Image (tube, rainbow, N blue to C red):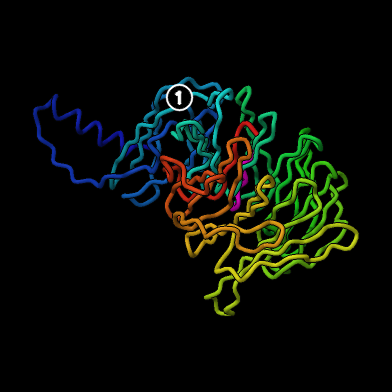
């Protein structure tokens, strides 16, 4: 497949042997990759620019090339580097890729779902990047449980990536179409993933720790998810019909559907499971000129809305700090985080300025930090929630188009 590349190299080598000067004018190809180390278990789709397809790919060093044009770093690969070469009759290019060691699970980590690059692993102490696990897909969410079992969705594909932090292991589970949000439930020994579209409807997929996969239709375009582990209930936000499906985590049957709010996108659940918060992802400057908002739903036999926020410009992500009764809501247009009183949904503080396109928020109670993935800036912002101030070194760089963050240990 790389005859053109071999011929080109042969010509360069022949120049010294025959004392002939050969003038070649070829294009320079480039292979897209990050400068951070790639972790064992990575599956990296090779994106080649500068030359037209078809082209050949050659590898010098550890790993292997999988069809179609994917570089895999097998589990157990030692730290080092690999040389990837792409070429055809029009051009040639090479990339030296760094291979890293699995992250130390004894240290605190931030796991970032990067739509463009995979899972970015940060050291939570100094916020540096430990490495990248390229999942082969387009992640929209990441979740981890107390045992170190993590899951990464693929919002454009049909499989999830499961990761064990101790010892390091990576597996892929097929049959999970257009995954959006995820949760790991150690009590149910299962992973739950919302599916935006399966045969024209939104759904919830349950992946058992034994590898079993089951699914239930929940409504129209399933996105947000909230898990009540104690009661074994999963709440699913169906964006395009304005409902929240209440799903039994054991039987995977829909118990009831709550008519919540237009374009219900993100969910948060109170610690005692009695109140559900739902974000309406509507934009004030849209064609319909309907601003978004947040509602609080008292759960029970007859769920009802008990509080509603003032209109918000374009809300999307939500996180709850139960200790201070504060609700944080990201606004993807205003580059701000609204701070609401969780009891009344009135403003509790002036909005916090942040970076571009803030997406799914994560609150870490152990460090009292709010993490904000800023998709528009390829960065993570972070705030001290007691002082409501940005922490030093934030925002800090991460992978391309970050959408969600999980904190280890939980």
Of residues 50 and 203, the one drawn nearer to the viewer in this rendering? 203
Of residues 233 and 15, the one drawn nearer to the viewer in this rendering? 233
Tell me the quadrant of the picture where the C terminus can be found. Answer: top right
Specify the segment rendered in magenta.
Answer: 151-156
- Residue in the image at 78% along x and 55% along y: 275
Residue 27 point in image, percent of width and height:
25, 47
Of residues 373 and 370, the one drawn nearer to the viewer in this rendering? 370
Q: Residue furthest right?
A: 301
- Residue in the image at 67% along x and 32% along y: 149
Using the rendered view, name the quadrant where residue 41 is placed.
Answer: top right
- Residue pointed to by mark 1: 62
Residue 385 point in image, percent of width and height:
56, 46
**Eyeballing the image, is 176 above or below 238?**
above
Residue 390 point in image, percent of width and height:
46, 46
- Residue in the image at 81% along x and 59% along y: 298
In the image: residue 160, left or right of residue 93? right
């Amino acid at each position: 497949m790389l005859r053109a590349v071999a011929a080109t190299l042969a010509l360069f080598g022949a120049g010294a042997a025959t004392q002939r000067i050969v003038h070649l004018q070829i294009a320079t190809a480039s292979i897209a990759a990050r400068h951070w180390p790639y972790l064992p278990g990575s599956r990296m789709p090779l994106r080649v620019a500068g030359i037209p397809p078809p082209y050949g790919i050659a590898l010098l060093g550890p790993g292997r090339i999988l069809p179609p044009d994917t570089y895999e770093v097998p589990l157990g690969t030692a730290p080092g580097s690999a040389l990837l070469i792409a070429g055809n009759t029009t051009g040639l290019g090479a990339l030296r890729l760094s291979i890293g060691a699995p992250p130390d699970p004894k240290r605190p980590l931030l796991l970032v779902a990067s739509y463009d690059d995979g899972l970015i692993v940060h050291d939570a102490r100094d916020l540096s990047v430990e490495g990248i696990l390229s999942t082969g897909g387009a992640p929209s969410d990441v979740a981890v449980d107390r045992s170190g079992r993590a899951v990464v969705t693929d919002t454009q594909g049909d499989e999830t990536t499961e990761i064990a932090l101790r010892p390091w292991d990576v597996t892929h589970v097929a049959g999970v179409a257009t995954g959006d949000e995820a949760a790991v439930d150690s009590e149910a020994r299962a992973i739950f993933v919302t599916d935006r579209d399966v045969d024209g409807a939104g759904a919830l997929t349950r992946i058992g720790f034994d590898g079993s996969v089951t699914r239930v239709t929940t409504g129209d375009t399933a996105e947000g998810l909230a898990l009540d582990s104690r009661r074994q209930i999963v709440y699913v936000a169906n964006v395009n019909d304005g409902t929240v499906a209440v799903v039994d985590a054991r039987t995977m049957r829909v118990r009831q559907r709550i008519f919540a709010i237009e374009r219900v996108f993100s969910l948060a659940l109170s610690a005692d499971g009695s109140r559900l918060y739902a974000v309406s992802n509507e934009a004030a400057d849209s064609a319909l000129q309907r601003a978004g908002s947040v509602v609080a739903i008292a759960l029970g036999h007859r769920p009802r809305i008990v509080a509603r926020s003032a209109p918000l410009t374009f809300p999307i992500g939500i996180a709850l700090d139960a200790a201070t009764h504060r609700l944080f809501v990201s606004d993807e247009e205003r580059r701000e985080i609204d701070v609401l009183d969780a009891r009344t949904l009135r403003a509790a503080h002036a909005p916090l300025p942040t970076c571009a396109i803030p997406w799914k928020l994560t609150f870490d109670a152990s460090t009292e930090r709010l993490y904000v993935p800023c998709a528009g800036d390829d960065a993570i912002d972070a705030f001290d929630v007691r002082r409501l101030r940005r922490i030093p070194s934030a925002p800090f760089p991460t992978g391309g188009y970050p959408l969600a963050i999980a904190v280890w240990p939980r």
